[in-house]
Amino acid sequence: MPLGTDYPRQDCGIARSLELVGERWTLLILRDCFLGVRRFSDFQAHLDVSRAVLSARLDALVEQRLLRRVGDGHPEYELTADALDLWPVLLVLAQWGDHRTTPGLPRRTFHHVGCGTLGRDGRCDGCDASPRAGDVETRPGPGADPTLRDDLVSRALRVPHRLLVPLATR
Amino acid sequence: MPLGTDYPRQDCGIARSLELVGERWTLLILRDCFLGVRRFSDFQAHLDVSRAVLSARLDALVEQRLLRRVGDGHPEYELTADALDLWPVLLVLAQWGDHRTTPGLPRRTFHHVGCGTLGRDGRCDGCDASPRAGDVETRPGPGADPTLRDDLVSRALRVPHRLLVPLATR
DNA sequence: GTCCTTTGGTTCGGTGAACAGACCAAATCA
DNA sequence: TGATTTGGTCTGTTCACCGAACCAAAGGAC
């Protein structure tokens, strides 16, 4: 893939990361996976991405072993253990983007279950740890805009819930 | 910019981040800034990016106030205070990419000056803090490939040095 | 089983972005 | 003052993303 995915002469961890997850839409697909989205049509409804691109991205993620296709018949897509390591990246990226564009009004907040709130460096303000994704609950933040979308996935995401737990969209 | 830069209906911090730094080459330009690169020709020599794209990206970063153009005559590009907040993002992304592609053989290591080494979650193994970029030293890691490039910037980066300190390439 | 709907895609033509390489003007050096 | 370096811009080509149409398999109703 000569254009857009490759940084062939960059001997650098960031370039390697971007070759895996740097294409348009890929990080948003993985974000949705952490939030509990698992089905092709749910990604499509939530992301407004063309089906062709979504299909290509899911195939690539499965091939890179960041996602696993589960079930016969209509598949579900599930994060692999390797992909769970991406959680700190997505968290600090979300915190930075929220703080950079609307300081003090995050669109979504993250909480260490039973403990405290996660700050911009990804640490819990209760215990100073950096919890795994499975121990994190997410809630809509004060900067969320509930008028922007009204698909089933967006509605399900307006309820506080734990990461990695499949969303009920039907 | 209709294609490639915008996620207009994604109410999410990650989408906001990607609108600022998600285009091809942008994060690598910012990485180079943290490593001490400051001039157009040095970015170009180190990145193998076309001059037109480099020019467009630098303009965009200046307009977003992530870079500042300094000096009359041939300018230098300097990170703003806002951009320094990106350091945790770049660090965890680099650590993830290195670990994901060549576990145990990072291309570059980062160290809390006078204390310890930074791990995959960005914490110093000496004091458990997450140091600011200015307190970090970087060195080529065991996975670095010194045969891949031989430009002046790459050579200067083979010497351990503190982040944010301008590289001497002449 | 047979029909019908939903799901999970693929295919297609059009548009915009990235590429390599030529070109150019201002800044700097000898 | 002339030559060289620097910091770009311009151009034609290639490639990726887009929306829309199309299609086949899965699942549900009967």
Image (spheres, coloured by chain):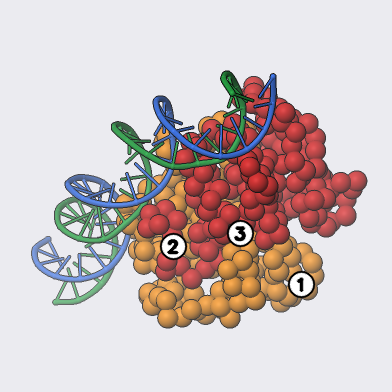
Chain colours: A orange, B red, C blue, D green
Mark 2 — residue? B7
Question: Looking at the image, which residue is at 74% across and 65% down?
Answer: A123
Q: Is residue B17 visible?
A: yes
Q: Secondary structure at mark 1?
A: loop
In 3D space, how far apart are the residues under numbered discs 3 and 2 (Cα atoms)? 20 Å
Q: Secondary structure at mark 2?
A: loop
Q: Numbered disc 1: what chain?
A: A
Q: Position of residue A121 (x, y in %)?
A: 72, 62
Between residue B126 and residue B62, name the one nearer to us. Answer: B62
Q: Amino acid at mark 3?
A: Arg
On what subunit does the disc labeled 2 rest?
A: B
Q: Quadrant of residue A136?
A: bottom right
CA separation, marks 2 and 1? 31 Å
Q: Amino acid at mark 1?
A: Asp
Q: Earlier in the sequence, mark 3 or mark 2?
A: 2
The quarter of the picture where the C terminus of chain A appears is bottom left
B44 left or right, relative to A74? right
Q: Are marks 3 and 2 in contact (CB under 8 Å)?
A: no
Residue D6's quadrant in the figure? top right
Q: Between residues B115 and B5, which one lies in front from this camera angle?
A: B5
Residue at image point 69% right, 66% down: A120
Q: Quadrant of residue C27?
A: top right
Q: Nearer the viewer, mark 1 or mark 3?
A: 3
Q: Residue B81: x percent and y percent?
A: 71, 59
**Would you say A134 lies left or right of B23 here?**
right
Judging by the rendered image, the residue that carries numbered circle 3 is: B65
Identify the residue at image location x=60%, y=44%.
Answer: B29
| Residue under label 1 | A125
Give me the residue at 36% from left, 64% from top: A48
